[in-house]
Image (cartoon, grey):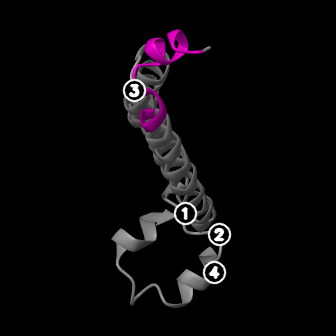
Amino acid sequence: MLYALCFLLFMIGLYCAVVKKNLVKIVIGLAIMEYAVNLFLIMLGYRAGGTAPIVGRGDLQAGAERLTAHFLNRAVDPLPQALVLTAIVISLGSLALLISMCIRLYDKYGTFDITEIRRLRG
């Protein structure tokens, strides 16, 4: 069910990026798609009934009396977290580039509407 919600969030961003005519709304749609992919990757890293790959079952058996059952049954793989953190930094840079391009286009054409910008081409 949660994966379907990630897919729905991605489709909302895709709709904004493809259908909308305003450049700012297109950029927001691209950002929503990036956030949906990041959320999906984080959710893939969750391991129900397991541990993180850096901690084996034998390591936990030695100190199991100190740990609660809640911790033993839930863990998140650190690799997708590192990948998503890198993706967030990259998407922040690309978002800044897209916003600066939108500002420059607005300075030149006076509008964010892509149909007007295409019509003003000459």
Q: Secondary structure at mark 1?
A: helix
Main SS of the magenta part reads: helix
As drawn, 20 above or below 112? above
Residue 74, image x, y percentages: 43, 64
Which residue type does callout 2 highlight? Pro
Would residue 41 be seen by someone viewing this image from the given angle? Answer: yes
Gap between marks 1 and 4 measured at Cα? 30 Å
Indicate which disc residue 58 carries. 4
- SS under mark 3: loop
Q: Which mark is residue 85?
A: 1
Residues marked 1 and 4 touching at CB (< 8 Å): no
Residue type for callout 4? Gly
Please provide the residue range marked out in magenta.
106-121
**Quarter-wise, where is residue 62 in the image?**
bottom right
Find disc 3 in the rendering and name its residue. Answer: 112
Q: Amino acid at mark 3?
A: Phe
Question: Under tag 4, what secondary structure?
Answer: helix
Q: Residues within 10 Å of mark 2 (few under 14, many from 20)?
A: few
Q: CA distance from mark 3 to mark 2?
A: 48 Å
Label 3, residues with CA under 10 Å away: few <14, some 14-19, many ≥20: some
Q: Relative to 109, does residue 98 appear above or below in the rendering?
A: below
Between label 1 and label 3, give the one nearer the viewer.
3
Q: Earlier in the sequence, mark 3 or mark 2?
A: 2
Give whichever of discs 2 and 4 has the lower sequence position.
Answer: 2
36 displayed left or right of 84: left
Give the residue drawn at x 39%, y 90%: 66
- Residue 60 to residue 30: above or below: below
Residue toward you, 110 or 63: 110
